Image (cartoon, helix red, strand yellow):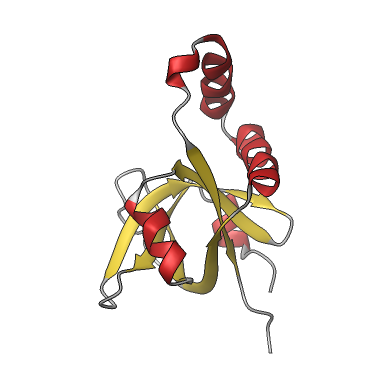
């Protein structure tokens, strides 16, 4: 299944990852489409990254900046993973194409090296339709 159009058009999505106990944790994130998957960027030490490292189960819904789910938004189950460095660069470029603030942040990181906190890209892939 390719990326659902509803998610591709959204400015924010609620990315739900799962703790080892099975408890769901929702986080609003920026997203971009990179081929057949959604990509997002996160601090390397963020909880969602830690959770993705031990369980790849995720669900995604369109939301606003505060994580409030849009009326009538569908829930899409997928598989999430942390991307390697090369894939992460491609994901960052996809995010920069969609969000001006990402481009400005990248510029600031080149000018002021101490702003360079470690970050990683995460991807969500959706199962093929049956």
Residue situated furthest right in the rendering = 35
List x then y, in percent, for residue 81.
Answer: 54, 62
Q: Can residue 73 be seen by looking at this rendering?
A: no
Is 12 situated above or below 5? above
Q: Where is residue 96 in the image (x, y as percent from the top left)?
A: 62, 32
Between 68 and 86, the residue placed more toward the observer is: 86
Q: Which quadrant is home to the C terminus?
A: bottom right
Q: Where is residue 35 in the image (x, y as percent from the top left)?
A: 74, 56
Query: How many labels sit on residues?
Result: 0
Point 49% across, 39% down: residue = 119
Q: Where is residue 123 in the image (x, y as percent from the top left)?
A: 58, 57
Q: Which residue lies furthest to the bottom in this view?
A: 130
Give me the residue at 37% from left, 63% from top: 51
- Give left or right: position of 42 versus 93: left
- Quadrant in which residue 110 is drawn: top right
In this rendering, position of residue 74 left or right of residue 91: left
Residue 71's place in the image compared with 39, above or below, is below
Tell me what residue is drawn at x 63 percent, y 61 percent. 5
1 w.r.t. 35: above or below: below
Quarter of the image that includes the N terminus = bottom right
Q: Front-most of 116 and 15?
A: 116
Whether residue 57 can be seen here: yes
**69 vs 79: above or below:** above
Q: Which residue lies furthest to the top in this view?
A: 111
Which residue is painted at 47% across and 35% down in the image? 118
Q: In this view, does 55 lie to the left or right of 90?
A: left
Left or right: where 37 falls relative to 66: right
């Amino acid at each position: 299944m390719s990326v659902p159009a509803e998610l591709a058009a959204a400015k924010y999505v609620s990315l739900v990852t799962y703790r080892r106990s099975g408890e769901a944790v929702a986080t609003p994130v920026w997203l971009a489409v990179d081929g057949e998957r959604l990509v997002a960027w996160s601090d390397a030490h963020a909880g969602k990254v830690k959770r993705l490292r031990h369980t790849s189960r995720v669900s995604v819904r369109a939301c606003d900046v505060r994580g409030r789910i849009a009326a009538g938004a569908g829930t899409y189950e997928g598989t999430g993973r942390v991307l390697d460095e090369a894939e992460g660069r491609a994901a960052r470029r996809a995010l920069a194409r969609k969000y001006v603030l990402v481009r400005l942040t990248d510029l600031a990181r080149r000018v002021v090296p101490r702003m360079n906190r470690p970050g990683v890209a995460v991807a969500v892939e959706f199962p093929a339709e049956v």
